[in-house]
C-alpha cells in the first residue's frame, strides 16, 4: 500500500505545520524588510537554506534509514553526539522555548497596558501553552488528524488574508537595501535562513512522520520511505509559497516604516497600517497557531528520539520532561534565546549540510569510508573556530580563509575534506 491522495496531502500539511513556527514567521519578513529592493535575490538564498535544504534533509534521512544511520557513516560516536546535540538544539534548549516566547511577544504585550506585569503574564502564558501542547504531543500518531486537518489550514488562511491586504493596499513599495543585503543579498539570505532551524529539524522529523504514515495503514518500509519523501516535497512547496508571501509583506513593511528591529516588528508595523487594531488580533492568531504546531511536533520528535535512545523513561515521560524544561527556558525571553541559538546553529548547520549533500552520492561513496569523517571533521572544526572567534577569541588567521568575509569560511575546508577523504580512501572497495 502506498501513501497517496488525501492521506499524502494531510501528512504533507502535518510536516509543514511542524516546520512552520516562530523562526519561519519572523525571518522571511525580517530579511525582506532589510533587503528592500534586493528582496528577491535575498529570498533566493533564503529559499535554498530554509526550503531546499530541509526538503533534501527529509529525503536524505528517509533514504538512509534514519538520522543515526546517516551519521554512522562518519563514526558511531559522532552519530550519538551529533544527533543528541541536534535534538537538544531543536528541542528543549532553543527551538521549543522559542515557540512560546515568540508567540507570547506577539499575542500578549500589544493588548496589555504599559504597566502590565509582563513577567508574570509570560509565566502564566507558558504554563498554558506547554500544557496544551503536551496534551496533543502525548499522542504522536494523531498529529496528522490534529495538525494537518485543523490547525494548518487555519494558519494558511490567516497568512493569505494578510497577503491579500498587501495586494489591495501596497502602501509605498519596497525600501532601500541595508547592510550586507547591499553587497551580497543571496549569501546573506542563505545565512539568515539558518535561524529557521529547519534543516536540523528536517533530520529529526522523519521519525514522527514515519509514525503517522504507518498509522494510515502503510506498513512496508519502502512505501514509508516514499511517503516520507513525497510529504517532504509537499511541505517544501507550501513553505516556498508562504515564505514568498511573507517576504512581500516584509518588504512593503520596511518601505513604509524603515529599519524595523526584527521580522516580528516588520509584521506588527504592516498589520497595524493595513488592518488597524484588528491587525494585532490577526497577527496574534497567526503566531499562536504556528508556534503551537511546531511546539507539538518538536516535543513529539524529541520524545520519540530520546525514548529510543534511553528506553528507561517512557515516551510520555520524555515529553513531560521536555515540556517542563522548555517552559522554564522560555521565560528567559526571546532576545536571550536568539543570541544563544546563532553560534550553536553556526556550528551544527555546516556539518548537517555536508551530511545531506554526501548522502545523495552514497552509491559512488560506498567503500570510501574516510570521505564522510574527513569532510565533516573539516567543516565542523572550521565552523567551531569561527564561533569561537565571534565569541571574542583572537583567531585573526581565519579572516584569510576564502569566503570568510561572507560567513562561508567552512565551505572550502569541507570541499578539501571531501577530496582528501577520497584520496585517503584509495580505490573503491
Image (cartoon, helix red, strand yellow):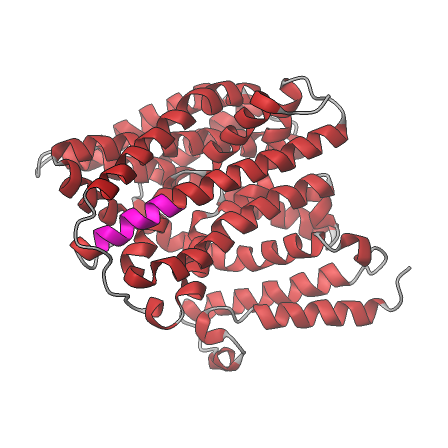
- The reply to whether the magenta stretch includes residue 253 is yes
Is residue 92 visible in this depiction of the protein? no
Residue 327, given in percent of the width and then of the height, sits at 37, 33
Residue 67, given in percent of the width and then of the height, sits at 66, 43
Classify residue 214 by image quadrant.
top right
- Number of on-image labels: 0
Image vertical order of residue 409 relative to residue 274, above or below: below
Q: Residue furthest front?
A: 168
Q: Is residue 234 left or right of residue 420?
A: left
Between residues 252 and 422, which one lies in front from this camera angle?
252
Q: Is residue 16 left or right of residue 208?
A: left
Image quarter (top left, top right, bottom left or bottom right) of the C terminus: bottom right
- The reply to whether the magenta stretch includes residue 329 is no
Between residues 334 and 307, which one lies in front from this camera angle?
334
Q: Is residue 182 left or right of residue 15?
A: left
- Identify the residue at horizontal 71%, vertical 52% (top origin): 360
Residues in magenta?
Answer: 244-254
Residue 196, given in percent of the width and then of the height, sits at 43, 48
Image quarter (top left, top right, bottom left or bottom right) of the N terminus: top right
Image vertical order of residue 147 relative to residue 369, above or below: above
Is residue 366 visible in this depiction of the protein? yes
- Identify the residue at horizontal 45%, vertical 57% (top origin): 44
Q: Residue furthest right?
A: 429
Image vertical order of residue 365 relative to residue 329, above or below: below
- Identify the residue at horizontal 28%, vertical 33% (top origin): 161
- Identify the residue at horizontal 32%, vertical 23% (top origin): 128
Residue 202, given in percent of the width and then of the height, sits at 56, 42
Amino acid at each position: 500500500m502506498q501513501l497517496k491522495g488525501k492521506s499524502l496531502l494531510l501528512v504533507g500539511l502535518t510536516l509543514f505545520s511542524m516546520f512552520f513556527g516562530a523562526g519561519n514567521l519572523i525571518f522571511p519578513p525580517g530579511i525582506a524588510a532589510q533587503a528592500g529592493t534586493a528582496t528577491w535575490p535575498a529570498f533566493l538564498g533564503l529559499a535554498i537554506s530554509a526550503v531546499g535544504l530541509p526538503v533534501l534533509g527529509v529525503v536524505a534521512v528517509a533514504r538512509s534509514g534514519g538520522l543515526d544511520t546517516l551519521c554512522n557513516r562518519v563514526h558511531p560516536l559522532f552519530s550519538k553526539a551529533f544527533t543528541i546535540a541536534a535534538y537538544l538544539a531543536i528541542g528543549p534548549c532553543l527551538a521549543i522555548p522559542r515557540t512560546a516566547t515568540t508567540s507570547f511577544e506577539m499575542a500578549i504585550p500589544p493588548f496589555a497596558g504599559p504597566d502590565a506585569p509582563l513577567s508574570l503574564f509570560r509565566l502564566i502564558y507558558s504554563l498554558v501553552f506547554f500544557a496544551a501542547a503536551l496534551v496533543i504531543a502525548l499522542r504522536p500518531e494523531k498529529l496528522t488528524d490534529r495538525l494537518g486537518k485543523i490547525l494548518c489550514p487555519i494558519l494558511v488562511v490567516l497568512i493569505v488574508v494578510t497577503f491579500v491586504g498587501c495586494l489591495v493596499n501596497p502602501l509605498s513599495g519596497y525600501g532601500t537595501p541595508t547592510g550586507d543585503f547591499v553587497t551580497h543579498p543571496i549569501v546573506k539570505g542563505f545565512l539568515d535562513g539558518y535561524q529557521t532551524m529547519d534543516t536540523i529539524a528536517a533530520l529529526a522529523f522523519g521519525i514522527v512522520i514515519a509514525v503517522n504514515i504507518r498509522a494510515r495503514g502503510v506498513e512496508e518500509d519502502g512505501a514509508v520511505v516514499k511517503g516520507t519523501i513525497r510529504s517532504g516535497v509537499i511541505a517544501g512547496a507550501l513553505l516556498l509559497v508562504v515564505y514568498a508571501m511573507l517576504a512581500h509583506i516584509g518588504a512593503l513593511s520596511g518601505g513604509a516604516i524603515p529599519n524595523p528591529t526584527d521580522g516580528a516588528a516588520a509584521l506588527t508595523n504592516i498589520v497595524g497600517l493595513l488592518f488597524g487594531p484588528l491587525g494585532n488580533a490577526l497577527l496574534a492568531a497567526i503566531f499562536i497557531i504556528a508556534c503551537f504546531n511546531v511546539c507539538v511536533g518538536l516535543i513529539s520528535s524529541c520524545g520519540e528520539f530520546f525514548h529510543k535512545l534511553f528506553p528507561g523513561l517512557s515516551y510520555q515521560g520524555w515529553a513531560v520532561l521536555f515540556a517542563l524544561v522548555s517552559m522554564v527556558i522560555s521565560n528567559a525571553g526571546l532576545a536571550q534565546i536568539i543570541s544563544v541559538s546563532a553560534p550553536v546553529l553556526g556550528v551544527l548547520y555546516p556539518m548537517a549540510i555536508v551530511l545531506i549533500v554526501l548522502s545523495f552520492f552514497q552509491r559512488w561513496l560506498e567503500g570510501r569510508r574516510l570521505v564522510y569523517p574527513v569532510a565533516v571533521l573539516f567543516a565542523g572544526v572550521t565552523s567551531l573556530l569561527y564561533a569561537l572567534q565571534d565569541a571574542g577569541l583572537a583567531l585573526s588567521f581565519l579572516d584569510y580563509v576564502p569566503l570568510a568575509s561572507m560567513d562561508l569560511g567552512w565551505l572550502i575546508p569541507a570541499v578539501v575534506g571531501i577530496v582528501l577523504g577520497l584520496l585517503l580512501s584509495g580505490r573503491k572497495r
